[in-house]
Image: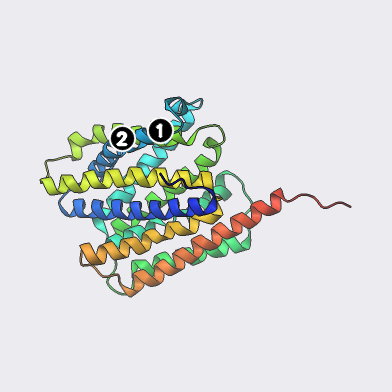
Amino acid sequence: MIRLEGITGGIILRILAAGSFSLMSGLMKLAAESGVTAPEMMFYRAIFGLPVVLAWVMMGPGLKAIATRRPLMHLWRCGLGVTGILCLFQALTLLPLADATTLGFTAPMFATLLSFLFLKEAVGRHRWLAVVVGFVGVMIVMRPGGDPLPAVGVAFALVGAGFSAGVTVTLRHLSQTEHVAAIVFWFFIACAVVGALLLPLFGSLHLPLAFAFLVGAGMAGGVAQLAMTESLRLAPVSAVTPFDYLQIAGAVLFGWLALSVAPSISTLAGAALIVASGLYTAWREQVRRRAVTAPTPPI
């Protein structure tokens, strides 16, 4: 069995996570084309992804790792995460795959805003400039002067990204005391429970092919979640985060090959600005942290 270690191992796992997330989103989009709703997507992602998570827990840290000392913080994190994933899946039902995925990557911009508003973090002009560039990219993706995207779909994508940013800010505190197994496990449980409660309202019978898409998407989502979190154990955030943007390339390819939807010039141009904004924000965050932790030179 190949054992991954160090920064190279973290990068390999992050690329695996990006590919798995792309596969999950693509399969969910195919399921949406068959009439599957966002709550159903969330429920089946959790149900079929949970066995993958449990297998990893049993082979790795063990069940004791899912115990928590901060249940209320987990409840808050799960509330943000469940709302965010429902919005992002709803956007997936309304927008082309590449556009929905691209708009989902506005989360770093919202994380900057939330850190400034609620954590009172100092945000320099460079990071504010990155936020502005990112939102210009959003406007280009929306194509206001051409064939515009459905406003409701764009709104769901941006709200979902905002809640994802809230999760990122919350995890900064939660990960200080909680094992990553607990964070992933309880989030999947929350998605399964909320999804089950919503199924009587939004669920229906589907063709076997649509159900097969959901099974594959759930398993891919479980693999992606584990690969993403494990990559952070092996490598610094700054080393692996840039590879997340491979999901946009994956969405473009999947949409083109499986859905016969070629990306528009506006989508590609807007995606380039959003990616540049996210990468620059990540780089500036790393520079800031190094400056804070740098030793004081001797007098």
Dot 2, how many residues are within 10 Å of its Cα: few (below 14), some (14-19), or many (20+)?
some
SS under mark 2:
helix
**Residue at left offset 28%, top offset 43%:** 218
Q: Amino acid at mark 1?
A: Met
Q: Residue at x 45, y 54 (%)?
A: 12
**Residue drawn at 26 percent across, 47 percent down:** 217
Looking at this view, is 207 or 88 the one in front?
207
Q: Which label was assigned to residue 59?
A: 1
Image quarter in which the N terminus is found: top left
Q: Nearer the viewer, residue 259 or 15?
A: 15
Q: Nearer the viewer, residue 130 or 223?
A: 223
Proximity of marks 2 and 1: CB atoms separated by less than 8 Å: no
Q: Check disc 2 and give the amino acid type.
A: Pro
Residue 113 position in % (x across, y down): 53, 52
170 to the left or right of 285: left
Considering only vertical position in the picture, is 138 above or below 214? below
